[in-house]
Image (tube, helix red, strand yellow):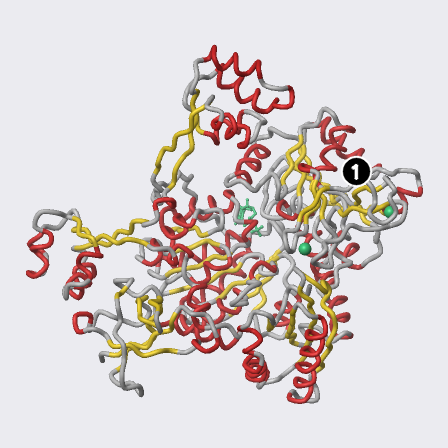
Amino acid sequence: MNIASVIVDVPAKQTDRAFDYLIPEKWLGVVQPGMRVVVPFGPRKVQGFVIAIKSESEFAKLKQILSILDISPVLNKELLDIGFWLTETTLCYAISAFQAMLPTAMKVKYEKDIILSDDHSVTDLHGELQSWFKDTRIVSWGDIEKSDLVKHIQKGIHNGILEVVYRVKDRARKKVIRQIEPALSPVDMQVFLEKLTIQANKQKEVLNYMIENPQKVAVKQLLENISANDSSIKSLVDKGVLKETKLEVYRDPFEDKTFKQTSALKLTEEQTAAITPILKSVNALHHDVFLMYGVTGSGKTEVYMQAIDSVLKQGREGIVLVPEISLTPQMVNRFKGRFGSQVAVLHSGLSTGEKYDEWRKIHRKEVRLVVGARSAIFAPFENLGIIIIDEEHETSYKQEDNPRYHARDVAIQRGKFHKCPIVLGSATPTLESFARASKKVYKLLTLKKRMNDRDLPKVEVIDMREELRNGNRSMFSALLFEKIQEKLDKREQSVLFLNKRGYSSFVMCRDCGYVMNCPHCDISLTYHRSNQRLKCHYCGYEEHLPSVCPECNSDYIRFFGTGTQKVEEELAKIFPEARVIRMDVDTTSRKGAHEKLLTEFGEGRADILLGTQMIAKGLDFPNVTLVGVLTADTMLHLPDFRASEKTFQLLTQVSGRAGRHELPGEVVIQTYTPEHYSVTLASKHDFDHFYLDEMRVRKAHAYPPFYFLTLVTVSHPELTKVVAITEKITAHLRNQLSASAIILGPVASPIPRINDRYRYQCMVKYKLEPNLTSILKKIVERYQQDISKNQLTLSIDLNPYMLM
Ligand code: ADP
Ligand code: ZN
Ligand code: ZN
């Protein structure tokens, strides 16, 4: 057994298979499947994953493995298999699948040290190792790796005598805090300040602060105290007025805030009815998929936690997936409060290093529960007892680049392997899941009652066309205005929600109707008020806001549409006394900003929380009694067959934010299409009815869940090429698939050009096509040459969620 099959880190069709390498004698028995190694590949040295160990190869002259990167496998057998399953079901390269399962930090070079554990002495070590640890407790892996002692080290680690610690090699990755301090005396700073021009008012603000507080201060802290930005600080540093220093701090993954310990609540009858079948399959080691359909506030999370508790008590492990945006501190605290240090948290707010630290806690079995966003589904547990996917309808569970996997599918695959239940929870399940539950493929669990026995909030739908007819041109209807005022008077809080998606603030000439478009992509440019620039959200192209229309020279060229900033300004005008917190991509881009703003609102330091999608879910503030939706229907007009479903889900979720505690809640939805069933049914909280209506529409148009979909998108810089290739692919599919498959296309994609590349698509709707993936694979092979030359891209999405 001296040959390793290795998948090399060269993502291309030609290299998408295993290559055989010889294992050097000293590493025999050490190298195992799931470890990363470095191997020669042509003239290069590349990383790779060992997928198997064998004794024979069909190739005669094998090269040797050059070094090993892991002391124990980073992917276990199950995850290796999941990787291969992903290549089959999403048509990705094996290397892409493996990499998607590991934290990004593993692509960074780490230095390893081997440490003799505190409670062991050098005599506990294997004889040959003792000389290495005679005078030290730390030996660098780089030094010892080339010796033939690796197997003894592996054993020492296994027995707890040795430990591995990782150091980041790249110094820049260490966490540093930028600090500044005066480089001049306060008097000299004052002199400098007086010489600054009027335009430099931001720099003046910085200086004034430093004159009053002439000590060392962290840049971050300074920026929180003043309105100036980093560039003003930098220019003062450049001018020699301030001095910048860097303080190195270490990440401390074990620094746990103290969480208030909670214990299991006595379950209600409904909750008991829901948890019983889950526990039954946990105990019977039985794989089932449960759909827990329960309105917001019906106690789903409590059921999850008690089911997890019983899994952990059996010594098994659990995964809880939560959409990235609902992974709020509130949510994390609930799990930490119940399960304490047994929990690891994986979300994008963590730095690369922190994510890696959390992953290692799982890998080293220091935790048994992970709460995280999509990729946490690959947590390297070996004894899973339950997987929970909260808000299962969220589209963020689908990864939009390779591998294009859906976390729900991965969960089910893992559940089959571990013989454990999967629980999908939602107040507004996807049509796909609810249909499966209706057909008894999934087991339906229903929670109908809200915990506080409160009715769901009363929802008023306002026809904005009517408002306009009555002479109200503002973005607030008379009723919403009145309600906000009322809440301000009562010192209660309001949440205002602006549905931004598909409704960017574009710039249009009011005289001739000319719209400013990106010269490279066929979409309108988005106006950014803060720097008066127009930006393309697909390719990043930017330009200045023109003062006159490029088409007709009129100076009546204005931006159109409502952004959160605009609403904020409007609020300041009509409710000057209101304290407003705005949450959108602009105000939350800095790390921790999201958390900070929510804490502020939770502590009652503002009256109104104004935001986009990111405030739609997960928030739970007792003093919020009004939710206003400024524009309910902006998403309805997107070219996406799920538009109604998404609108319904969003409106239902948003409405659920009001009246979650003692105070009753009210909701006002403003819309231009009050008659649309997704609006009327959301206002009545009527999922069941919505499901039936929407199923009828899907059936009529042959969409999921009645048909499966596959979307092939072709792009190329030349329009004629794109059309020709898409035509060929479409014809080929028509030829090869069964007569019952519906093949649409070729047609231009809803966004027909991005970054100077034309986009065409072909959509396949089908019920059963066992050969579909192999046909698609052949198509990709057929165009391989054009793809490697970087001219053509062929993207194949089996079960697409993004149809643009
Ligand atoms: P969901 O996840 O369905 O939105 P939660 O689990 O958050 O619902 O429950 C809503 C509220 O009810 C929470 O404050 C929770 O602590 C409380 N709660 C849940 N189950 C119980 C119970 N059995 N007894 C008392 N309170 C409960
Ligand atoms: Zn014009
Ligand atoms: Zn562009």
**Residue shown at 81%/41% (left/top)?**
558
Q: Position of residue 300 (x, y in %)?
A: 55, 54
Q: Quadrant of residue 390?
A: bottom right
Decide if residue 210 is in sight here: yes
Q: Quadrant of residue 279?
A: bottom left
Q: Position of residue 276 (x, y in %)?
A: 49, 63
Decide if residue 625 is in sight here: no
Q: Quadrant of residue 4?
A: bottom left
772 to 468, vertically: above or below: below
591 to 30, vertically: above or below: above
In the picture provided, is 715 more to the left or to the right than 54?
A: right
**Residue shown at 42%/46% (left/top)?**
336
Q: At label 1, which amino acid type do we have?
A: Leu
Placement of the N terminus among the 4 image quadrants: bottom left
Look at mark 1 in the image and give the residue it sits on: 480
Q: How many marks?
A: 1
In the picture provided, is 389 more to the left or to the right than 550?
A: left
**Residue shown at 72%/54% (left/top)?**
518
In the picture provided, is 139 more to the left or to the right than 21?
A: left
249 to 372, vertically: above or below: above
Q: Nearer the viewer, residue 756 or 300?
A: 756
The crowding category of the residue bearing disc 1, from other C-alpha atoms within 10 Å (few below 14, some 14 to 19, many at least 20), is many
